[in-house]
Image (cartoon, grey):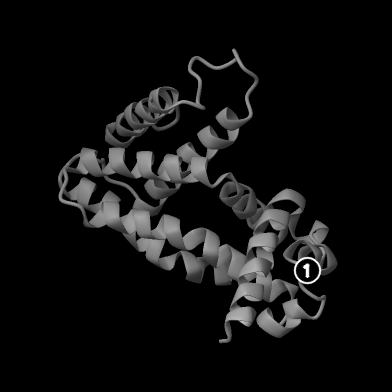
Amino acid sequence: MPSEEADTRGALVTAGRRLFAERGYEGATVRAITGAAGANVASVAYHFGSKEGLYLQVIMEVLSPLGERIQEVAAAEASGTGRIEALLQAVFEHLWDNPDQAQIMVEVRLHRADLLPQLAEMLAPMTTGLMQIVTEAQASGVVREGPPLLFVMSLMAQPVYFMLLTRRAPEGVLPANPHTAEGRKVYVDHMVDFALGGLAGTHRTEGR
């Protein structure tokens, strides 16, 4: 691909990522995206086939780095608790550095349910890494028995929620400043302690 075309394609993905996160799929028009990218209106169709094609490419760009970090954690030589701690820290720090990722993923799930099959396919490598972390922790006795996917969902929900909650909280409301490395460590440590307690705990009493 000629350099000029590659530059245009990259500029469209960058502009699309920002505007999809800020305005959602419907609110981010092709004209707004191409204007922000300094490209002509027809360039989205030329490079991606459609606005939806650009949207899917943005999602892929958003997911790939996080998927790589999760796979690194899954492949690391560490105990079950060590991997879970490393996982929560990696996901929280990644989302903190890429706040638009959580916004885009929430947008997809709430407003573009038609894309969930394609999203599941994109998430497959990440899901495999997460399931490996949980199933190996179950095998070592660190995590209690139960459906690994539910444990994965609970683990991933924590860093997403904490990032969304802490990033824009008014100063003085939270117990530690999340805009410092020391403050973020407070939240990661809490997530790890909370997760390990829940993962190792017992089921609630039936009928309670």
Of 114 and 175, nearer the camera is 175
x and y percentages locating residue 42 in the rendered image = 80, 81
Observer able to see residue 115? no
Left or right: 201, with 35 as reference point: left
x and y percentages locating residue 170 in the rendered image = 65, 20
Q: Quadrant of the C terminus?
A: top left
Left or right: 111, with 58 as reference point: right
Whether 34 is drawn above or below 129: the answer is below
Pointer 1: residues within 10 angstroms few (<14), some, or many (20+)? many
Whether 121 is drawn above or below 83: the answer is below
Which residue is painted at 63% across and 50% down in the image?
A: 106
Left or right: 57, with 49 as reference point: left
Q: Quadrant of residue 189?
A: top left
Observer able to see residue 17? yes
Number of marks drawn: 1
Secondary structure under badge 1? helix
Q: Quadrant of residue 45?
A: bottom right
Left or right: 201, with 118 as reference point: left
Which residue is painted at 17% across and 50% down in the image?
A: 139
Which residue is painted at 67% across and 72% down in the image?
A: 54
Whether 112 is drawn above or below 47: the answer is above
Q: Quadrant of the N terminus?
A: bottom right
Of 56 and 155, nearer the camera is 56
State the residue position of label 1. 34
x and y percentages locating residue 50 in the rendered image = 73, 78
Which residue is painted at 77% across and 52% down in the image?
A: 23
Of 143 and 132, nearer the camera is 132
x and y percentages locating residue 60 in the rendered image = 53, 67
Whether 125 is drawn above or below 196: the answer is below
Amino acid type, mark 1: Thr
